[in-house]
Amino acid sequence: MTNLYHNRSAQWIVYALMFAFLAAIPLITNDSFLLNQFATYGVYGMLAVSISLSWGFGGILNLGQGIAFGLGAYGMGMTMQMQSQDPVSNPIPPFMLNNSLDHLPALWSPFQNTALGFILSLAVPTIFYVFFGSLMFRARVSGPFIAIMTLAMLTALYTLILDMQPYTNGANGIAPPAPLKLLGAEIDPYSVASYWIVYGALLFVTVASKLITQSKFGLVTQALRSDPERVRFLGYNVASYETIVYALSGLIAALAGCCLVMLVQYVSPAQLDVNFSIGMVIWAGIGGRFSLIGSMLGAFLIQGGQSYLGDQFLATWLLLLGGFFILVVRFLPKGLAGLLELSLGMIGAHMQPKDASRPQRGAEATSKAEA
Amino acid sequence: MGVLNIHNLCKSFGGTSVINDFSLEVTELTLCCLVGPNGAGKTTTMDLITGRQKPTSGQILLRSDEITSLGEHEIARLGIGRKFQVPAVFRDLSVRQNLEVAYSREVSPFKNLFSYRPSGLNQKLEEILTITGLGGRVETEAGTLSHGETQWLEIGMVLMQNPEILLLDEPVAGMTEGEIEKTVGILNELKRTHTLIVVEHDMAFVREIADVVTVMHMGALLAQGSISEMEANPKVREVYLGDPED
Ligand SMILES: Nc1ncnc2c1ncn2[C@@H]1O[C@H](COP(=O)(O)OP(=O)(O)OP(=O)(O)O)[C@@H](O)[C@H]1O
Ligand SMILES: [Mg+2]
């Protein structure tokens, strides 16, 4: 009856082990290129956690996570760009001059202040998600339509950023000339420091998300993903629960966007590319969307596969990935994490033959112990 | 005036009228059985009370407050709990999790983000597990329960909510004789502290629990009174109970 997979202490141990392993990476290697690449994996990890939270735990099939990711990334790009401009002698970024703007647009001026820039990078996408989410969830838009609406919104935003050439530099994107400066120090994207920043962000995001899923809030979202109607009759305002879980996932994606731009010193509409957002859902689907860590490992696995095998297989890589996804969806609806759950369940059942012969008493004993 | 008052309720779905000028007054701390043939509009009446459907016209008052225009979750918070005709439990959650979700004393999402062990939960959980006899099944996934156990779980969920008024739509459908007997005991215990409206086809069960029986037919009130009055009523015999001489 008892499955180690569902044991909370065991879960926390697995998380601790994974983060211990990730912490060991900079001790093992000092190849700065590799460190930078691993740090980008941390960004993917955050995105996977955000999808697991909204789709796995909240039942919101969110195909437009690039909205928050992209807005966060642009916010960070703008902040870093303005760090290189002098407010008095040279306030206008070069690409704007090329687009014959003769003053800094109002949209950009708050980003002259780094702290305000950070705050806006996180707050704007989150607030956007609150509005867009409450619009959808109050109208009780059902699953497939949420997928369509988030996708449509992502495409609209992508087009908008592409079209606002003078403000966003269109398809060329924004490439801040210098790395991010934090408290007077420059954070070299290829340094151990930037790895630790992303590590810290991922750790924070994962622990916070894990705590959320274990809270009463998390339990209510898990209930409403299968039957929102029933949850309403228990007295919960379903739309506000959905909006909050959606906005929290947006906040995480925005943070991931900030981290990415810190690491690559570049932001472009590619961050809002539809394929990338759908890719995030595939990571979670394969890794196991009901598990934060499963989704994260799914992201590492697939992005790793893409960068190491993708070069060899080229076009067939997408075909392989698609086929793999179909197989997982068909045979493992809970992803690879579900496979682990199944195996641990079978091992658990095997290890306790005595309990199986008298399930009633055994189960009662555990329920008493836990209560 | 009763605790729940329904005045001249009408509901039509795209022209077909399902509830026709239905009025009902439910007295506090009584158990009212709502009976009637299939399609009489019993479930629809519950839908209207709990806000799942909005009436075409008419009023529903909780004491003297109009609740007709409120949302489902607001009505639930006012103390009206409901068990559905088709048992509605969260199939992929465990029995314990189902009951924990139903323990909705605190409904604010912000407070619940930081809530792990709501106060009073364990005590209530123990109490409900004892009443429903699901103590040995707490860690079982609700989707794998038997039909009777699922009914029990949903009754347990309504009890976890601790409502003032309980609406139970066919609570003993699919239960064994023994299980029905146990339900009778619980409902008779509950009506000392709660007001209940129970929809049920099983007349033997109705006889055991009902203080008042309300018979609906084609969306309207046909008759109301004690169980023996209803069984003697020729109109009720004709449309619902079936004349034994046939
Ligand atoms: N959403 C709906 N749209 C159209 N017609 C509906 C709807 N809901 C119920 N009805 C109709 O209203 C009538 C009353 O249905 P209701 O479910 O209330 O009956 P009931 O008394 O609960 O019957 P039963 O004993 O079979 O559960 C039925 O004829 C049904 O077809
Ligand atoms: Mg019915």
Image (spheres, helix red, strand yellow):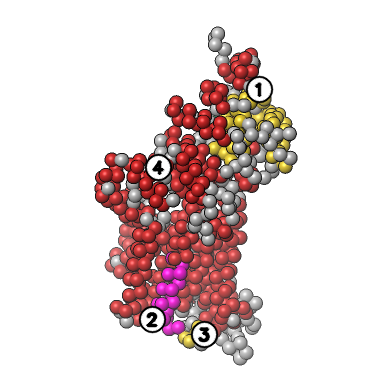
Q: Which residue has dot 3 on it?
A: A183
Q: Which residue has dot 4 on it?
A: B137
Question: If you read the primary sequence from the N terminus, does the residue marked by circle 3 or circle 2 appear first?
Answer: 3
Amino acid, disc 3: Leu
Q: Nearer the viewer, mark 4 or mark 2?
A: 4
Q: Nearer the viewer, mark 4 or mark 3?
A: 4
Residue drawn 62% across the image and 29% down it: B32
Across the whole image, how many numbered discs are drawn on residues?
4
Q: Residues within 10 Å of mark 4 (few under 14, many from 20)?
A: many
CA distance separating discs 3 and 1: 80 Å
CA distance separating discs 1 and 4: 40 Å
Q: x, y (%) of residue B232?
A: 62, 14
Q: Residues within 10 Å of mark 3 (few under 14, many from 20)?
A: few
Amino acid, disc 4: Arg
Dot 4: what SS?
helix
Dot 2: what SS?
helix
Amino acid, disc 1: Gly
Q: Please identify the residue farthest to the bottom as the structure is shown.
A: A89
CA distance separating discs 4 and 3: 56 Å
From the viewer's perspective, is residue B203 above or below residue A132?
above
Q: Looking at the picture, tell me which residue is in the foreground, A264 or B70.
A: B70
Question: If you read the primary sequence from the N terminus, does the residue marked by circle 1 or circle 4 appear first?
Answer: 4
Label 3 in the same subunit as label 2: yes
User: What segment is highlighted magenta in the picture?
Assistant: A187-206
Is residue B111 visible to the viewer in this orientation of the structure? yes
Q: Verify whether residue A189 appears in magenta.
A: yes
Q: Which residue has dot 2 on it?
A: A192
Label 4 in the same subunit as label 3: no
CA distance separating discs 2 and 1: 81 Å
